[in-house]
Amino acid sequence: MEFFAEYAGFLARTLTILLAIIVLLVVVALLRQRERHGGGQLQVRRLNDFYKVLSARLQDSVLSKAQLKRVRKEQARSAKLERKTGTHKPHVYVLDFDGDIKASAGESLRHEITALLSIATPQDEVVIRLESGGGMVHSYGLAASQLARIREAGIPLTVCIDKVAASGGYMMACLGERILAAPFALVGSIGVVAQMPNFHRLLQKHDIDFELHTAGQYKRTLTLFGENTDKGREKFQEELELTHRLFKDFVARYRPQLDIDAVATGEVWLGQTALDKQLVDALQTSDAYLTERAQHAELLLLSYVERKTLQERVGLAASAALDGVLLRWWGRLSQPRFWQ
């Protein structure tokens, strides 16, 4: 009897392990099936509800029962009146753009704009919370062109700058019919910059030859390893000047009130000075503007999220785990501590 009991226990453990492996394989297969479909997902969040929850939690903590009862009663009366009168509130579509050098967020931005243009009307509004110090010309040019689609559809576009919109960031911001900036936001930098090291003399010092073969007089102007010439430098500068002129023309087209030559010096200004130079239209944070609009409109935050592959998810999980281990290890060694 003892033998059969041990055998039954062994068999149960074996079946449990096999069942766990089968479940794991099914989950992996389902994940791979989802990956083959590709694409991403548009997420929609109602900011009005978010603001209401914030307010309600504070009211619960601060107001007396009698005061809270009066507030809730007034809110219920207002909601009932809106339903009865059939009041239609316009929609405000809120987009976030946090730009890096390659304007990588432009990939999600184009899908968000495609989605909202399928339903938005000129009575609605698009608000973009823009943060970017600029980057590659062609990448930000494409991102700005996405915002131009909103203008061309006749839908009001408001750009909010809380921290920085410079260079390519301002190229995008100037598409807004209204530009709002926080008092200490950095705005401007209507200029073009390019730089590269040159290792030609280092290679010569170590008797290393470098050959570069081109077809076309200006296929290469400046190089990393070859010997740069004055002619190449002149051509490179000419190309920078051309890009700058196109940048100035683009900004002047959408902000005709600007003295473009006075502001297109590559300088960056804080909010108040930017307002004086008409680079922005008002000093106001995005939070202040959106909470005001929430009184008279339905605010919808759109976020297009790309699906990550199984390998990417595993890699991110492993990276997060490693970061946690390193932080705990470093935290025990370093003083002062900025984490727990």
Image (spheres, rainbow, N blue to C red):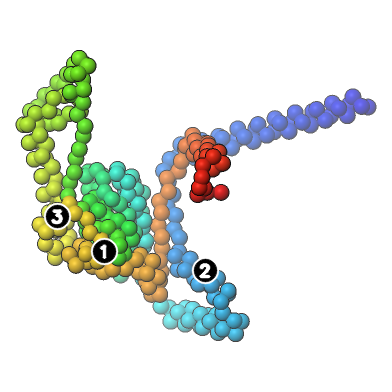
Say if mark 3 contacts mark 2, CB within 8 Å: no
Whether residue 80 is visible to the viewer of this picture, yes or no, is no
Identified by mark 1, the residue type is Gly
Q: Is residue 114 above or below residue 32?
A: below
Going 55% across and 70% down the picture, which residue do you hit? Answer: 57
Q: Is residue 194 above or below residue 254?
A: above
Q: What's the CA distance linking mark 3 and mark 1?
A: 16 Å
Circle 2: is it few (<14), some (14-19), or many (20+) Cα within 10 Å?
Answer: few
Residue under label 1: 271
Residue 335: x and y, percent? 51, 45
Residue 45: x and y, percent? 45, 60
Q: What's the CA distance linking mark 2 and mark 1?
A: 31 Å
Judging from the image, what secondary structure is the residue with disc 2 in? helix
Residue under label 2: 53
Say if mark 3 contacts mark 1, CB within 8 Å: no
The N terminus lies in quadrant = top right
Identified by mark 3, the residue type is Ala
Q: Which mark is residue 141?
A: none
Circle 3: is it few (<14), some (14-19), or many (20+) Cα within 10 Å?
Answer: many
Q: Is residue 316 left or right of residue 244?
A: right
The answer to which of 334 and 189 lies nearer the viewer is 334
Residue 180: x and y, percent? 28, 65
The answer to which of 13 and 325 lies nearer the viewer is 325
Q: Is residue 179 left or right of residue 323?
A: left
Identified by mark 2, the residue type is Val
